[in-house]
Image: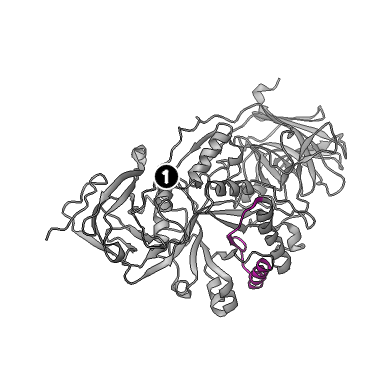
């Protein structure tokens, strides 16, 4: 018998001498789980820091690539960090309440990003999660659950601020990223949400491992409260006890891989197989966009890259188009077909998922054949497996037996010297289906979507600008900003540096480090030296200066300017470089080879204003450092050869208030 065949000859040549495996797609026995969407995560932390500083034309294009429906990634979910004044991977994000009497819903850039996403897609779902908490929440401890009602009220104030200040509805709320959960707190949070009119906000717990399932099985009240079980980096697998429990399962943070073609392959594999293997109905990428300095931890771990706002350059990476294979042809609320009736592993390697619209009028099928070495994620380890070219037949039954045509989209990955020959998200138009049968010849390392929807588009803008070096000389008086803004190009690693209006009218705006008490950290190590980096990590010979003033009340004890700073992120505490500290009350300076000042190069007396402003300047050229305060040279000395290069930075010797103004930096060769 000769079967009617849909020949997709443009996709790949048929696999000769290979029998065709048949896969049934049939809704007669019902459906699998509800699909909850594909998302991206901004934060955890400061991963979108540089995006807000892009020129508007390029910034709008980037946002379209991420959020605009039927254009590119077309994300269903945007997850953001609820800032907690502490380092949370690539920087610190500001809290809406630095202290109990403080309340501000305009700090940072996540509010802006949430609104830009919602502007492009009113149906996008929003998800908030704290990584850290301001210190007053723990009242001297590192425990945010010390007073569950206090913490719940703090978090719900953020939900309320989203609505009242920005007209944003937060759909999902997490507990504490990758840290222990507390059942009493989760119950208190639910009661507080309900009491304040946010009963529609659903709880995801616990953004870590599977352990909360055990508590849900023992506590029916908890089970009713937790709407989604969110885990991180599950390797596409979930334990049987989690599947049996019945709550929707999410990979609420995943990917975290360099966004080259192997990273794109990782993303293609897990977006499909998180459901095929683990029944996880949502997968969220950490991170949304790699918009932080590449020398900080986990470089280029976003769906796309935008790390040089001064040039306007950005790169649309392969994960954007991998995402489009699912997001442009599904929506949250669609339904997976049952396993072996539209959802399965492929006999020759790879996987297939099929999803139907709520009214069952539309069908989307996504197949991936990513090979092991071309789809390795950063975590967890990937067990060996093989993929080979294969012929398959899709047999459409039930409600789908009368489908007469489908639209076809294909991405084909190449690697190594052939990477440039990759072809992503190409439309092959509409093709006919005869008698409910589709024959495909699948190559290795490709993603194919077949769908009844005609709305797909490979959106494109003209190529972004060429990359350019960070502009030098560079200066910032901070006068061009409104209050509570992080100035362009600075990337706070410890502490929170916000623009404030100076009491001195001649100064206008200034930059103030505002954290006065150690926060409840997310990082393993206590980070107690506020530091704010800027520039190009490859810089070696640099000159930097800044005016600084330490208030008498709640002030830090010392301030610094530094060059060749070699560390950021959770390892900021061990940063090496050339650090020039001044201590006004002690009337002394310290030149050190590291942030923690355990490697002192030189120290001595200095004539410093105790409550007024001091200008500190540091010049490094080869192995010589020259430092001055208020125009008076304090040292001209030899410094260690290492580190040879790094960021420029300003910062403090301890938490406490301190003001900065008139920041300047240039290459040492440009110093007269």
Q: Quadrant of the N terminus?
A: bottom left
Q: Nearer the viewer, residue 102 or 656?
A: 102
Q: Position of residue 648 (x, y in %)?
A: 66, 36
> Is residue 517 magenta-colored?
no
Q: Is the residue 183 above or below the residue 564 in the image?
A: below
Q: Position of residue 210 (x, y in %)?
A: 52, 69
Q: Position of residue 175 (x, y in %)?
A: 62, 64
Q: Nearer the viewer, residue 136 or 570?
A: 136
399 lies left or right of 83:
left
Q: Is the residue 607 above or below the residue 212 in the image?
A: above
The residue drawn where x is 58% and y is 65% is 202
| Residue carrying label 1 | 318
Q: Which residues are magenta?
A: 166-194
The residue drawn where x is 39% and y is 48% is 455
Q: Secondary structure at mark 1?
A: helix
Is residue 146 among the parts visible in the rendering? no
The residue drawn where x is 53% and y is 64% is 230
Q: Is the residue 499 above or below the residue 665 in the image?
A: below
């Amino acid at each position: 018998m000769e079967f009617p065949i849909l020949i997709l000859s443009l996709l790949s040549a048929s696999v000769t001498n290979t029998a065709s495996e048949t896969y049934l797609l049939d809704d007669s026995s019902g459906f699998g789980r509800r699909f909850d969407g594909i998302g991206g995560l901004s934060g955890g932390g400061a991963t979108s820091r540089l995006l807000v500083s892009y020129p508007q034309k390029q910034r709008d294009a980037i946002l379209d690539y991420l959020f605009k429906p039927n254009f590119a990634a077309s994300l269903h979910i945007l997850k953001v960090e609820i800032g907690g004044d502490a380092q949370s991977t690539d920087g610190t994000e500001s809290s809406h309440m630095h202290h109990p009497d403080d309340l501000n819903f305009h700090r940072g850039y996540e509010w802006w990003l949430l609104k830009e996403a919602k502007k492009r897609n009113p149906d996008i779902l929003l998800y908030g999660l704290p990584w850290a908490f301001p210190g007053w929440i723990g009242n001297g401890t590192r425990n945010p659950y010390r007073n569950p009602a206090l913490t719940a009220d703090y978090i719900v104030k953020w939900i309320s601020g989203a609505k009242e200040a920005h007209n944003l509805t937060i759909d999902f709320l997490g507990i504490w990223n990758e840290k222990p959960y507390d059942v009493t707190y989760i119950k208190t949070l639910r009661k507080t949400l309900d009491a304040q009119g946010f009963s529609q906000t659903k709880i995801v717990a616990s953004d870590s491992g599977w352990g909360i399932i055990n508590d849900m099985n023992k506590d029916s009240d908890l089970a009713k409260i937790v709407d989604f079980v969110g885990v991180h980096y599950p390797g596409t697998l979930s334990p049987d006890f989690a599947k049996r429990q019945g709550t929707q399962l999410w990979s609420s943070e995943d990917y975290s891989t360099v966004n080259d073609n192997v990273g794109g392959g990782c993303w293609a594999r897990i977006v499909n197989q998180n459901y095929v293997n683990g029944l996880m109905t949502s997968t969220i990428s950490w991170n949304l966009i790699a918009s932080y300095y590449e020398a900080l931890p986990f470089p280029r771990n976003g769906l796309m890259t935008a790390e040089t706002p001064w040039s306007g350059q950005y790169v649309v990476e392969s994960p954007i188009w991998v995402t489009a294979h699912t997001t442009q042809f599904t929506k949250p609320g669609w339904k997976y077909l049952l396993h072996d009736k539209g959802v399965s592993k492929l006999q020759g390697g790879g996987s297939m998922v099929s999803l139907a619209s709520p009214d069952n009028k539309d069908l989307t099928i996504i197949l991936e054949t990513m090979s092991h070495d071309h789809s390795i994620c950063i975590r967890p380890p990937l067990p060996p497996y093989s993929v080979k070219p294969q012929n398959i037949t899709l047999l459409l039954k039930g409600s789908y037996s009368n489908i007469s045509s489908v639209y076809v989209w294909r991405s084909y990955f190449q690697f190594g010297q052939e990477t440039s020959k990759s072809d992503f998200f190409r439309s092959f138009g509409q093709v006919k289906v005869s008698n409910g049968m589709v024959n495909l010849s699948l190559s290795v390392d490709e993603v194919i979507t077949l769908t009844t929807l005609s709305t797909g588009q490979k959106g494109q803008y003209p190529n972004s600008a060429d990359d350019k070096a960070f502009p030098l000389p560079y200066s910032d008086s901070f006068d061009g900003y409104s209050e509570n803004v992080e100035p362009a190009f600075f990337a706070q690693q410890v502490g929170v540096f916000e623009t404030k209006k100076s009491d001195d009218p001649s100064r206008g705006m200034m930059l103030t480090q505002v954290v006065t008490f150690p926060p409840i950290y997310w990082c393993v190590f206590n980070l107690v030296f506020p530091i704010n980096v800027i520039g190009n990590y490859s810089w070696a010979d640099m000159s930097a200066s800044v005016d600084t003033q330490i208030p008498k009340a709640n002030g830090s004890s010392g301030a610094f300017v530094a060059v060749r700073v070699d560390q950021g992120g959770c390892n900021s505490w061990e940063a090496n470089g050339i650090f020039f500290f001044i201590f006004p009350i002690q009337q002394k300076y310290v030149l050190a080879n590291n942030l923690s000042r355990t490697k002192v190069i030189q120290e001595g007396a200095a004539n410093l204003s105790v409550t007024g402003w001091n200008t500190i300047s540091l010049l490094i050229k080869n192995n010589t450092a020259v430092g001055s305060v208020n125009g008076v040279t304090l040292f001209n000395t030899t410094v260690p050869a290492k580190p040879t290069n790094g960021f420029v930075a300003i910062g403090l010797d301890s938490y406490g208030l301190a003001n900065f103004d008139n920041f300047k930096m240039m290459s040492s060769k440009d110093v007269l």
